[in-house]
Image (cartoon, rainbow, N blue to C red):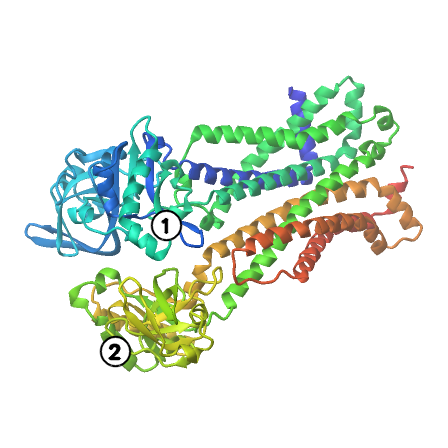
Amino acid sequence: MNTNYLKTTFRHLWRNRLFTGLNVLGLAIGISACWIIYRMVEYEYSFDQRLPDADRIYQLVSKSKDKNGREDGFAGVEKPVTNVLLNDVSGAELVVPMFYRYYNSVSMPENGKQTSVRFDREIGQVTTLPSYFDLIDYQWLAGDKKTALDAPDRVVLTEKKAREYFPDLTPDQMLGKTLIYDDTLHKQVSGVVAALDYTNSFNRDNTEFMRISEADLNEGSWGGMSSNDLVFVKAQPNTDPQHIVDQVNVFCRKFNAEQFAQYNFERWYGLLPLLERHFATNYGAQTRTVNKNVLYGLIAVGTFLLILACINYVNLSTALLPQRSREIGIRKTLGSTAGSLIRHFIGETFAVTLFALALSFLLTFVASKVFSVFLPEGMFDYVNYRGMLLFVLALIAVISLLSGLYPAFLLTKVSTVNVLKGQTAETAGRGRLSLRKGLIVFQFLVAQVFIISAVIMGQQLQYTLNKDLGFNKEAVVTVDVPYKTYNRPENKDKEFVLANELKRLPGFTGVALGDRPMDNRMMSNVHSYFRDTVEIQKALHMKMADTAYLRVYGLKLLAGRNIRPSDTINELIINEKALEIYGFSSPSEAIGEVLVTPYNGQSYPIVGVVADFHPMGLRSEIPPTAIASAKDRLHTFTIKLPRDPAQWQAAIQIIENEWKKVYPGVPFEYRFYDKFIEEYYESDRNTQKLIRAATGITIFISCLGLFGLATLTAFQRTKEIGIRKVLGATVSGIVGLLSRDFLKLILIAVVVASPIAWWLMNKWLEDFVYRINIQWWMFALAGVAAVAIALLTVSWQAIRAAMANPVDSLRDE
C-alpha cells in the first residue's frame, strides 16, 4: 500500500467514523473472545508436556464393572499393588507410590522450646519413595535427592512451604530443622526444592514430601481403595505398558476372586497415560481435571463469535458501497485494476483489524476480571510467546481475508458508466442483498439459539433451587468437626457436650448431629433381605443421624418410630425407594423386618420408614437410603436458627463462643445449608452465566450487522421514501415499510433456530433426572425478544429516513 492509498484509507475511515467504530468494536469483541479462549485451551493442553519422558509415564487406575455391565473408573488403588509392582512385575523402570496424608498442626521447636505453632485443616503431605524425585526432576535449593528420603524421619519441603515455616532462614539453614506434626510425628528437613516451573498435574507449590511408611507398603488389604492412594509407573524404553498391567491384574483377580464372585462384579487395573491425566475427569483425585468436550465447546463459541464479527464487518462494509461508488468509478477510469482495488480494500480491512486488536487488549483485561470464575487459576501465568505471536498473526490474517474479500470483490463490479451517469444506487446491486440477508439470518439464528438456551437453563436452575427436596433447608447452619480434631482421644464425645450446651440456650429451635441429607460425599453398604427362599441384595446409601435429626430436617416418618441412641449401628430407618427395591408393599409391612450385611452377617431391624428425600441432587435418581445411628460417626452439627433473620448473626456468634469453649484452637467454620445446596449446582450456574454472556455478545454483534443493512436499505430507498411522503404516506407507515423486510429475516432465523435449540437443550437436560419440560412459551419469549431487539435496532434508521425532508431527496432529479 503506497502513501496515497494510506492517506485515502484513513480519510475514508475518518469520514465514516460511525461505521468504522462499529466495525472496530465488533471485531474487537470477536478477537477478545478468541484470545481468552485460545489462552485457556493452550494452558490446559500444556499440562505435563515438559515432563521428561512423559510419554512413558502412566498412572495405575482402577476399573470396575457391575452385574448390569456398567463400567466405572477410580483413581485410587489397593495398597498391596505397590509391592506387587516393586517385586513381582517386570517392565517398569520406576514405580512411584503417592499416598496423600493429612495433619492438623505443625510446630517448629527451637532451642528446646516450641517457638511457633501453625494450625491448618488442609496441611497435606505426599508420602512416597525416593524414586519420586527420579520421576520428576525438581531444582534442589538445598539437600540431595539421592539421600533426602533415605530414612523415615525425613521431610522435603517445597520452597513456598519452607518459607511459611522458616521465613527468616535460607534453604541451607533449614536443613536439619525439626517439624512436629500433630504433636507426635517428628521429622527433620532434609531438602528444599523449587516449585516446578511448568504446568503439571502433580503437586502444588506448597507440598511436603515424606518417606512412605512400611505400614503403608505392607499393610492394607485387597479390596480396599482410597482416592488418597495413587501409583505411577514409568515403563522401560520399548516396553509395551499393557504387559505391566496384565501382570498386575493376575494378582488382582487372584486375591479378589472371592469378593468378585460374592458380589457379582469385576475389577481390574488399567494404565492412564500421563499426558491424558489432566483430561481424565473420572480419575481426578488429587489434581484438577478438565473435560475435553468443554474445551471443544469453548473453541466452537469462540469460532462462532469471530465468524459473527466478520459477518458484521461484511454487512457494514457493503452498506457503504453506494457511497463509495463514485470513488471506485473514478479509480477505475484512471486505470486502477481489479487486483489493485482488492489489495486496497484488504489493506483497509487490515487497518481496521489492527485498531480492533488494540481495543481488544482493553476488552480482554475487563473480560478476564468479569469472567474470572470461568478461567482456570494460573492461566495468565503461563506464557508461550512463540505460540501467542503465531496465533495473533494467524488471527489478523484470517479476519482480514474473511472480512475483506467479499466487499473487495463487490468493489470490482462497480460499473464506471453507471457511476458517471449518477446511478450509484443501482451500482450497489440490489440483487446482492440476498447474501447479506442470509448473513443476517445466520447471525440472528445463532443469537436465537443462545437466547432460547439461556431461558431454558434459567428455568431449570430455578426449578433445581426451588424444588422441594424432601427436607427443610431454610434457616439452617451446619458445622463440621475436622477429622483430626474428633479423632484425637481427648476430644472423644465432645460433639455431644457441645450439642447439649446449644440445646440449653434460648432461641435455637433445633440442634442435631449427623450427615447432611444432601451432600456430595457418599457412603453405601450392601444389605440383603431374605423373602422366603429368595435373597434380595441391594446397596443402601447410608446417612448417620441422632434422634433429633428427623425433627430438625423435617423428614416425614411414614411408619414405625425414630431411631434410638446407640454406640454402633443396630437398627435402620429406610426411605420409600428402599421400600420399593426390597419388595415391601407398604411402609407398615417393612417395620420389624431384618436386613443383613453379607460381609459380616450382622442383622439390622427396620424400625421406621421416611418419605423420600434427595441425597444426591436432581441430576440423579433418589437412591435407596437408610438412616442409622452410631455414636462415633456423628461429626456434623445441624443448627436451626431463630425464625427472625435479624437475630441470626447474634445466634452464630453464640454458637462460635460455645464452640471455642469445647474446641479451643480449632477454627469455627459454618455454612448456611441453603447456600451449600446452591454451591452444589455452581457448575450449572456458571454455565448459565457463560451462556448469558455469549447471548449478549452475539446479540450485540448481530445488531451491528442489522444496523448496517438498515442503513443500506434506507440509502437505496431515499427517493422512494420522498415520493411516498409527497403522496401522503405517514411516518409510521414508512417505518413499517422499511422494517417489514427485517422482520421477515428475524422470523426466518427464529423458525430455523427453534428446533436446533430444542435438540441442544434436550441433550443438556438429559443430565438431570428431575427436569423441567420444554414448553412452547420459552421459544415464543425468545422469539419476541429477538424481534424486539431487531426492531429497536432498525427503527432508528427507519424513523430517520421517514422524518427526512422529501425535498432534499427529490431535487437532484
Q: Quadrant of residue 499?
A: bottom left
Q: Residue furthest left?
A: 112
Please tell me which residue is depicted at 39% across the width and 41% down the height of the picture.
278
Please tell me which residue is depicted at 27% across the width and 77% down the height of the picture.
565
In the rendered view, tell whether residue 544 sits above or below residue 74: below
The reply to whether discs 1 and 2 touch (Cβ–Cβ < 8 Å) is no
Q: Is residue 557 visible?
A: no
Position of residue 662 in the picture relative to residue 681 (left or right): left
| Residue placed most toward the observer, 480 or 176 | 480
| Residue placed most toward the observer, 506 or 221 | 221
Position of residue 535 in the picture relative to residue 90 (left or right): right
Q: As shown in the figure, which amino acid type bears the numbered disc 1?
A: Glu
| Quadrant where the image shows the N terminus | top right
Please tell me which residue is depicted at 77% across the width and 17% down the height of the picture.
335
| Quadrant where the image shows the C terminus | top right
Residue 613 location in percent, x, y? 45, 70
Quickly name the residue at label 2: 501
Residue 363 location in percent, x, y? 53, 43
Q: As shown in the figure, which amino acid type bears the numbered disc 2?
A: Glu
In the rendered view, tell whether residue 679 sits above or below residue 194: below
Q: How busy is the neighbourhood of tag 1: few (under 14 within 10 Å), some, or many (20 plus)? A: some
Q: How busy is the neighbourhood of tag 2: few (under 14 within 10 Å), some, or many (20 plus)? A: some
| Residue placed most toward the observer, 802 or 310 | 310
Residue 354 location in percent, x, y? 58, 32
Please tell me which residue is depicted at 47% across the width and 75% down the height of the picture.
585
| Residue placed most toward the observer, 646 or 251 | 251
Q: Which mark is residue 758?
A: none
Is label 2 in a helix, a strand or a loop? helix
Quickly name the residue at label 1: 266
Q: Quadrant of residue 357?
A: top right
